[in-house]
Amino acid sequence: MLIVRGAIKDYDWGVIDGLQPWSGQATGAPQAELWFGVHPGGPSPLVDTGGEPTGELLADHFDIEAIPLLVKLLAAARPLSVQVHPPRLLAESGWRQQQAPGSLAVYSDPFEKTEMLVALQDFEAFAGWRSEVEAAAILSALGISDQIVAAVRMRDRATAIRGLLEASSPARIGRLAEAAEAAGLAPEQVAAYATVTEHYPDDRGALLTPMLAYLSLQPGEAVYVPAGVPHSYIRGIGLEVMTSSDNVIRLGLTGKPVFVDQAIAALDDKVAPQMMATRHGDLIWPVNAPFVVRMLQSGGERIPSGAYRILLLIEGSARVESEFGEIVLRPGTAAVISADDPDSFVAADGLVAIVQSTSRQVEFVHERWDVARNEY
């Protein structure tokens, strides 16, 4: 059992000092993400029981097979890119092909990225496909051609995406909120499109957002986004749990490279976002997800062995015990427990995120979660 802090990412869409309660740093600059894991893009530093850095990284002790999940705290002040994560086979083949000299660097690693966001504060997102009727109404109000609107109605995503990118202009982007209102969307959705226009007035990908469904999450609610689902987080603070990958293929709302063909190839119409209205203490386990999450508030929980576990303190304090001893967590620190470590027990006076991999012994782990909770 080890203690880590998050590796901070200062992407420009972050909230000014938005992660200070967990990073412990006031930089006066955007703070976008804190990474808790071993991904090479941001391996977590180890800290001692007093919260001081030890000079080591979690990756010095475990590889990505032993730590199969990446947990993040995310603070978004403005929309993130319209993006899609490649499914496993595409990620593996794409990564292998781009190792050839002169190839485009599209894939960050050879792994599938599937993720879930749990809102810690009010959170807004575009995720999955909006109904064809609504999307067509918005685009028609923007004066988009009948051919492109017909592609949207027919669910011909590739034709619609390429057509909208070609038809995009600052004038049309500037009318997104007006078109959303004309199509009869609720005020909060109109405001979301106004936000897109404000921050991305010249970005061709802004015109793709009418194709995406709008989601509003209250604290404790979650959305699961499988690989292959297009999405763009709009604003808010949340906990992200994902497979240990940073594979992001962008279509717009970004200054980073956009790869249209590869993003279209990564789309999977057989999967969709899963919205889960939960309360603190509920088990959050999306269908086919490789992880399970419980947001434990002021209570105790026995955490069974047999899978990777990470316990991240969100607020208050928490104590984690095992046969190896006891550690005390502070906000922004996490206990990392490998699959081979014994059962642990956590007692929280506040809010702690309990994240567990389900890639090994799924039915066994689910059963033990229920038994352990009943025992307590």
Image (cartoon, rainbow, N blue to C red):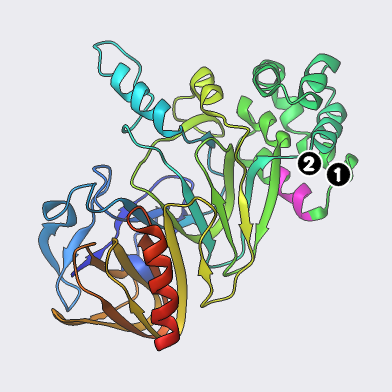
Q: Position of residue 323 (x, y in %)?
A: 15, 81
- Judging depth in this view, the residue of 79 and 99 nearest the camera is 99
Magenta segment: 188-193
Q: Is residue 190 shown in magenta?
A: yes
Q: What's the residue type where badge 1 is placed?
A: Glu
Q: Position of residue 109 (x, y in %)?
A: 31, 33
Q: Is residue 45 shown in magenta?
A: no
Give the structural element (helix, strand or loop) at label 2: helix
Q: Give the vertical position of 230 relative to 363 (above or below).
A: above
Relative placement, left or right, of 254 versus 277 is left
Q: What residue lies at 29% left-to-right and 61% top-to-bottom? A: 307
Q: What's the residue type where badge 2 is placed?
A: Ala
Whole-angstrom CA distance, mark 2 to mark 1, is 6 Å
- Judging depth in this view, the residue of 286 and 53 nearest the camera is 286
Residue corresponding to mark 1: 181
Relative placement, left or right, of 258 versus 193 is left
Q: Position of residue 370 (x, y in %)?
A: 45, 76
Residue corresponding to mark 2: 177
Q: Is any atom of residue 102 visible in this view?
A: yes
Q: Is any atom of residue 355 visible in this view?
A: no
Q: Position of residue 94 (x, y in %)?
A: 37, 22
The quadrant of the picture occupied by the C terminus is bottom left
Give the structural element (helix, strand or loop) at label 1: helix
Q: Are marks 2 and 1 in contact (CB under 8 Å)?
A: yes
